[in-house]
Image (cartoon, coloured by chain):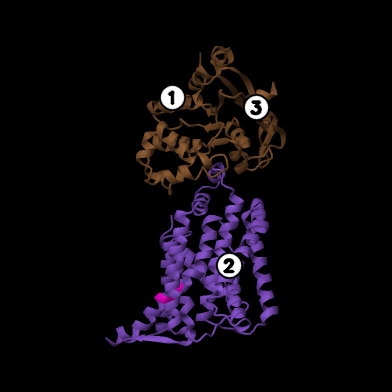
Chain colours: A brown, B purple
Amino acid sequence: MTEDMLLKISHVDAFHGSFQALWDVSLTVKPGEIVAIIGANGAGKSTLLDTISGLVHPAKGSIEFEGKIISTMEPFQVVGLGISQTPEGRRIFSDLTVLENLIIRSYNRRARPEREDNLQRVYQFFPVLDERKSQMAKTLSGGEQQMLAIGRGLMSNPRLMLLDEMSLGLAPIVVNELYKVLREIRDRGITILFVEQNVRRSLNEADRAYIMEAGRVILSGNAAELREEERVKKAYFGT
Amino acid sequence: MTLLSDLATPLVMGVLLGGLYAVIALGLSLVFGVVKEINIAHGDLVILGSYFGYVAMTVLGIDPILSLVIGMPILFGIGFVIQKYLLNRAFKISVDATLIIAFGISIILQNTYQLLWTPLSRGLTTSYALASFSAGPIHVPLTYLLDFIVAIIVMLLLRTFLMKTYLGKAIRAAAQDRKAAHLMGINTDQVYACTFGISAVLAAVAGIFLGLTFSFTPVSGMSFLLIALGIVVLGGIGSIVGTFVGGIAFGLAQTLGGYSLGLAAQMLVAYVMVLVVLALIPRGIFGR
């Protein structure tokens, strides 16, 4: 059972200074899945992604990736193992060109030999990045910047992509486009764990979902089942 | 006409001197802009470069400029180790901790220089260090011209390095957004150590040309640190062009202030200018 888990988070507590942001969080992701983490602002979703990425080290519990304990690793080592996070707010390097933003993420041992292939793949998903590759990243529109952020995530040749609030502040038509690409990325064998405030959207896009509240996982399961769950309907769809 | 020809020499000297100041300030600006540390020991590292040239000249009989071939890698190593084993750890506690540690390093370096080379004033008095050149009404020491040329070369090299190499791009990325740099798979501790190392290499170069231009003592680092801080504030943190322009502005304020108000007023004029610029454009001339 454990063997076919790509990511296994077990009973994790994590702190921001003296504030406990995660309480006994457990979560699993199987290869090839799209899994959503849903919850309101301050529920601990972003902290959970940062804990997987090694930016925050858990005070208790463990995180395993492909059977290897990663909860004590530094962020660059986690990236090297094949986990890439696209953080909230995109955080592209505005004073680097589009191409530089992409290339800078391809220096770990996994990604370096496949840099050209990965770059072509990114351009295939987002042709606009190819057209604008020598522009400063700050000259892109919000939607294009998010495409760059996702494209950049692919450049480290990940097995697991973490996406934090990728649809925030974008027009629905752009968001539809991004989710379409996400499904294509999954079809290429990359597993996806994403954080989203939009509950309806998340449950439509994901195979499974975890619902978080105040740093705890309060509900989890099959996305289709969660859509029908009374508590979810009541809390999030207002019916 | 007489006023103009009288002014010509201090004007040219100010600009050329600004080049030297820019090289001294460049390393400070780099660490300030990328690692977000104020390296109080930067001036002392510059003076270490000067003493390195002094030893090369007096003990080994090598030209101080040629001694950079050995001096630069050694300073890189010292800078790398300081950041990697002291400041990176201190930074995880607080920014203040790095300030205190840098202050401690500064005191240790100054006392070491006193022990090794006595408090006497030294200079890199090569044959060309004493030469001067004249053009019309302008009379300027040759070293000043050398300083300026070196400043331009150093800045172009640094810029090319930051623009073209992976390490340079990683340094720029880490300067812009630490968290994002982590997520890119950049080993930021290593990048910061390299940045500090490069800053120390810049100090090595600055030290040699400082020694060719001025005399120095074990505690000279502090006064050049103050000049460098003024320049970084003037030009804008982390900007190469800004540091260059800030250096020239500082040099000009000093020579023109000295020319019109007397030597004692040199620093006063320069710092009044820093304060005025700070009040009007708090981010500096080229600051973001």
Are the residues under badges 1 and 3 in a single subunit? yes
Question: Callout 1: residue from which chain?
Answer: A
View extreme (right): residue: A60
- In terms of secondary structure, what is the magenta stretch mainly? helix
Are the residues under badges 1 and 2 in a single subunit? no
> In the drawing, what numbered circle is on residue B206?
none
Residue type beneath disc 1 = Lys
Q: Position of residue B82 (x, y in %)?
A: 65, 61
> In the drawing, what numbered circle is on residue B42?
2
Q: Quadrant of residue A61?
A: top right
> In the drawing, what numbered circle is on residue A180?
1
User: According to the image, label 3 marks what residue?
Assistant: A216
Asked if residue A237 is positioned above or below residue A161 in the image, the reply reads above
> Which residue appears at 55% of the width and 66% of the height?
B201
Residue type beneath disc 3 = Arg
For the record, the magenta segment spans: B15-19
